[in-house]
Image (tube, rainbow, N blue to C red):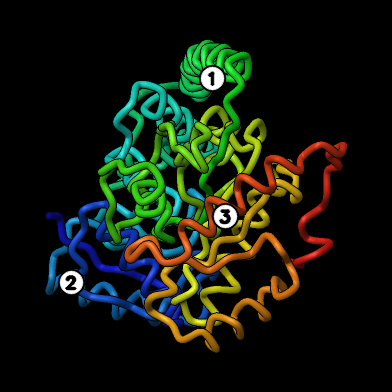
Amino acid sequence: MNSAILITYDKEDAITEAVGLCDAAGYEIVHTIKQDFLKKPKYGISEGVLERLQEVVEKLRPDVIIFDEILKPHQNYNLASILHREILDREALILEIFERRASSAESKLQVKLAQLRYEMARAKEKVRLSSMGEQPGFMGIGKFEVDVYYNDIKHRMQTIRSKLEKAGKQRELHRQGRKRQGFKTISLAGYTSAGKTTLFNRLTGETRQQSKELFTTLSTTTRRVTIDREPFLISDTVGFISKLPAYMIDAFKSTLEELLHTDVIILVIDVSDSIFDLKKKFSSCIRTLSELEVERDRIIFVLNKSDLMQQEQIDEKTEILNLKDNKKTISVSSKTGENVNELKILIKNIIENQNSPKIKTEFEASYGN
């Protein structure tokens, strides 16, 4: 496992998530720097903090510096030039996790597309900076001219997009086949590590890999589940995360598009989270589903990990999320199976009642940002 110094926000939820991301990417944190502000123009951090960081780097000699915010190319260059280490910002770190987790041919293509989108946004600036001299740890680009380098990325992106388009058409054929056979479909969605895969296993009897690590699932898996002697198909999807750039969501659209065509979406929420984390993660999920143009009337809100909470705590959090009077809200425990049968009944009832025309709804109008 490679060693890393982590620079993150001085907030418990930010630290917890950043540590989880580092662990999922295979980095052991040997030192953490906590700051209230990570958006200083030149380095992201102040020059005083940078001086102290230099001393720590000299002493601990980490493999990388992980910066828990999105850095501009010149900020990355400035930090790398002084610290003589590779600098990974939040986006680059998530991309590394995606690369480690991708197992199917399609998810590998999606990750590669996201990596190229990340690189393209920085291509021109990197070429300009490379002409200024040495770039220690700055992912140098050799002797490419800016137009050659930029066009090379564009060409590779077009190739991957065409392959993903073919995969999307194949997926559409599968959907049409399922529809002809009369199968109703269910999709799981939610913040990464909310317990989607555990619930998937509970509903289907599967033994898919489940873990506290982030992004256990990157490719969609579909299995059959029987509810009241009637067969349904259920799919697990990639988890959401805060500050996930639009281009990363776009890269995974061929996977996430299942959410647009499914009869019911189960939005899995970790009810054991602190109120601050709960609101932040819920807001992030709602925003992502809104960007995907998913219709609200097809969503069941599942408050998972109820075995870790008292009923009054669950009730309080349900009210905080403005879900108290929502008849499509249920608390369950994927671990113990509590209320899972009731969830199945709710799924079946909602699908049976889906005879009225569907109207697209803006999530934020109901739940805010």
**Quarter of the rendering occupied by the N terminus:** bottom left
Residue 154, numbered circle: 1
Q: Provide the secondary structure element on which disc 1 rests.
A: helix
- What's under tag 2, amino acid-wise? Val
Residue 30 is marked as 2
Secondary structure under tag 2 reads strand
Q: Which mark is residue 267?
A: 3
Q: Position of residue 310 (x, y in %)?
A: 46, 86
Res. 148 in view: no
The picture quadrant where one finds residue 112 is top left
Instruction: Give the image location of residue 306, x and y in percent.
Output: 44, 74
Which badge, 2 or 3, comes first in the chain's sequence? 2
Report the side of 4 relative to 256 (left or right).
left
**Which residue is at 41% across, 32% downward?**
223
User: Do residues under tags 3 and 1 come within 8 Å of each other at their CB atoms?
Assistant: no
When the figure is inspected, residue 179 is found, relative to residue 229, above or below; the finding is: above
Mark 2 or 3: the one toward you: 3
Which amino acid does the dot numbered 1 rest on?
A: Lys
Label 3 amino acid? Leu
Along the polypeptide, which appears first: circle 1 or circle 2? Answer: 2
Using the numbered discs, state the Cα–Cα distance from disc 1 to disc 2 in whole angstroms: 38 Å
Quadrant location, the C terminus: bottom right
Residue 212 location (% of width, % of height): 30, 61
Is residue 90 shown above or below 19?
above
